[in-house]
Image: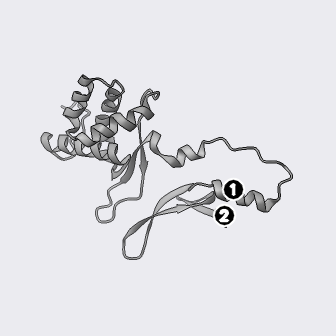
Amino acid sequence: MRHGKTNNHLGRQKGHRVALLSNMASSLILNKHINTTVAKAKALRKYVEPLLTKSKDDSTHSRRVVFSHLQNKEAIKELYKEVTTKIADRPGGYTRIIKLEPRLGDNAQMCMMELVDFNTLYIAGTAKKSRESKNKKKQGEEESKRRRCSPIITFFIDNDIGQRKLAFFYGEIKLIKRQNSILASVHFLS
């Protein structure tokens, strides 16, 4: 019986699984986000978050422990140089999993895994807005809104030959729920 055995083997033997998680963790640290399957992302979260917590203590011992897991000098430099300074005051939960559409071919559930403090879309949305005078013309308000507007929705568009491209939209979004699906209507700023 496998009571209490919570490790997801991912259909691989131990050596292959450890190498996979090590490479994915290095890619996540270097690129700040990766696209993978949901099962791999959940396994990677359990692997990389203790390493990020360990990296908060910048000592020779912690560097050696993290290097024994990652085996990538560039990832270690990036981790201790940039990532640790941003996650220093965060008590945990360093990664975020955002589900994407299923993969073409085998219909596997895909997701984007990212480091929470490095997503500029969410950080830009929480910035304080400056107060504007009441008697400003409407055209001037739209112009200033257009200048400070950041992408508010990002997703992949499939074209007719199966290629995906990243699309950024600027404007206001209204979600419309119809039966089993949610449609997004985007009001573009011109």
The residue that appears at 33% across and 65% down in the rendered structure is 104
Q: Is residue 13 visible?
A: no
Q: Kindly indicate whether the residue at mark 1 contacts the one at mark 2 (C-beta within 8 angstroms).
A: yes
Towards the viewer: 49 or 17: 49
Residue with the most extreme bottom position: 160
Counting every numbered tag in the picture gives 2
Residue 52, placed above or below residue 142: above
For the residues carrying marks 2 and 1, which lies nearer the camera in this image? Answer: 1
Question: What is the secondary structure assignment of the residue under circle 2?
Answer: loop
Q: Which mark is residue 50?
A: none
Residue shown at the point (25%, 31%) measured from the top left: 66
- Give whichever of discs 2 and 1 has the lower sequence position: 1
115 to the left or right of 11: right
Q: Quadrant of residue 128?
A: top right
Give the labeled residue for mark 2: 189
Q: Secondary structure at mark 1?
A: helix
**53 and 141: which is toward the camera:** 141
Q: Label 2 neighbourhood size at 10 Å, few (<14), some (14-19), many (20+)? A: few
Q: Looking at the image, which residue is at 66% across and 64% down? A: 189
- State which quarter of the image contains the N terminus: top left
Q: Is residue 18 above or below residue 5?
A: below
Amino acid at dot 2 = Leu
Report the Cα–Cα distance between label 2 and label 1: 9 Å
Q: Is residue 59 above or below residue 19?
A: above
Would you identify the image quadrant in which residue 143 lies?
bottom right
Instruction: Specify whether 146 is left or right of 160.
Output: right
Q: Is residue 88 left or right of residue 149?
A: left
Quadrant in the picture for the C terminus: bottom right
Name the residue beneath numbered marker 1: 145
Q: Quadrant of residue 41?
A: top left
Judged from this view, the residue extending furthest toward the right is 135
**Mark 1 residue crowding within 10 angstroms, few (<14) / some (14–19) / many (20+):** few
